[in-house]
Image (cartoon, helix red, strand yellow):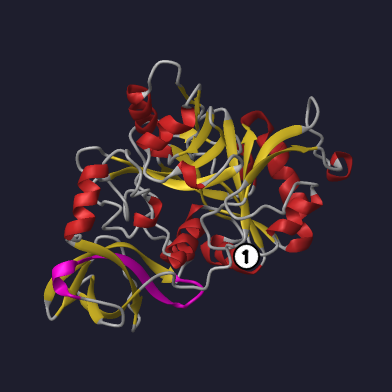
Amino acid sequence: MTDATYVTGEIPEPSADQPRHSPLHERHIALGAKFAAFGGWSMPLEYAGGGVLREHTAVRSAVGVFDVSHLGKARITGPGAADFVNACLSNDLGRIGPGRAQYTLCCDESSGGVVDDIIAYLYGPEHVFLIPNAANTAEVVRRLRAAAPAGITVTNEHDAYAVLAVQGPRSADVLGALGLPTGHDYMSFSTADLSFAAAELGATPAGGPVSLVVCRTGYTGEHGYELVVPAEAATTVWDALLTAGEPYGIRACGLGARDTLRTEMGYPLHGQDLSLEITPVQARSGWAVGWDKPAFWGREVLLAERAAGARRTLWGLVALDRGIPRPGMTVLSADAGVGTVTSGTFSPTRKVGIALALLDSSAGLSQGDHVEVDVRGRRAAMEVVRPPFVDPSVK
């Protein structure tokens, strides 16, 4: 079994257009990265000498660093900017204060489907920074600009910043070695100057210290941080992280491991577990909806769906034999199709196949029930469960 077996479908086929490159592209080449097209970008799938399994294990047991610079960046500023964003996106920014981040959804007004899932950084009443997914950034920005009143500016800053995710139980040690703050509460952030012992690390930033944002967020289920770094300083920070992380077993990690890690946590991937055809109610993402807010895109249709009950619901599946579920495979109960796998992989931690699947509510399935998945013509036995599939240590 090769490491390629662990890839779940997060990486789509290359587009016809020339893919974009991260500011760290040359660093990835030097590390022997295997690249794949994702969201219009050419990003590392895995690295030579590691592979998905070893990279996954590094994050669960020590620390890994991911280049996720393909993620979008958008800034909304002006009088009432936070109130404007709050009237558009699903979650309630009123639940948090400045210096906090929040997971939220951009939903379609007419269908309630998910245009994108987003992390919102609240700086204050007149300043919100958003991190959407790569392929959806332009559409999110377009919708916000179309709705913005006079005085509100929506800026697409996709190319201005790199994003580095430092994830794992030793992540705080790595950041601490660089003099970066590590005492954040979960989903909080601060701006810091990276004025570490540059001479010792051989990574002196040109023009002085690097100002960056350190946020206690991540997509792995482990204690970790995401750094929003000016694009021109990305290589300096990347090099410093790898050098400072050597004593802690740091490993550069690609999108293959990111996908197995997030699937073990039951975290949704837009385009598979969330989409314009899959609403927050169906995907069990209602916790990211401010149901009592007077306005957000898709509010009325989602309230109606919640009241009536969703026609399908996202569940977890754990293999009871050697079957490995993959996206698009049919779920069966009593020989009848009752749903579809949205995400599926081999769990490096559990050593079994796991999946997220949309199951028809009419089938009456619940936790502990047994179903089958059609794995290339063979019926593989699965148990219905509620994710996560591993114990989280993210908080």
Residue beneath the point at 42% across and 66% down: 5
Tell me residue 173's x, y (percent): 75, 58
Q: Secondary structure at mark 1?
A: helix
Dot 1 amino acid type:
Ala
Residue beneath the point at 49% across and 52% down: 255
Residue nearest the observer in this picture, 381 or 88: 88
**Image quadrant in which you'd find residue 114:** top left
Question: Residue 197 in magenta?
Answer: no
- Identify whether 227 is placed above or below 372: above
Residue beneath the point at 72% across and 53% down: 182
Viewer can see residue 118: yes
Instruction: Characterize the local packing of mark 1: few (<14), some (14-19) or many (20 or more) Cα atoms within 10 angstroms.
Output: many
Outermost residue on the top side: it is 150
- Identify whether 157 is placed above or below 262: above
Tell me residue 303's x, y (percent): 24, 50
Total labels: the figure holds 1
Q: Where the C terminus falls, by quadrant?
A: bottom right
Tell me residue 136's x, y (percent): 37, 37
Residue beneath the point at 29% across and 79% down: 382
Magenta stretch: give its range: 347-364
Which residue corresponds to mark 1?
A: 58
- Identify whether 40 is placed above or below 117: above
Outermost residue on the left side: it is 336
Residue nearest the observer in this picture, 395 or 273: 395
Q: Is residue 185 left or right of residue 311?
A: right
Residue nearest the observer in this picture, 145 or 35: 145
Question: Residue 348 in magenta?
Answer: yes
Tell me residue 14's x, y (percent): 37, 41
Residue nearest the observer in this picture, 151 or 179: 151
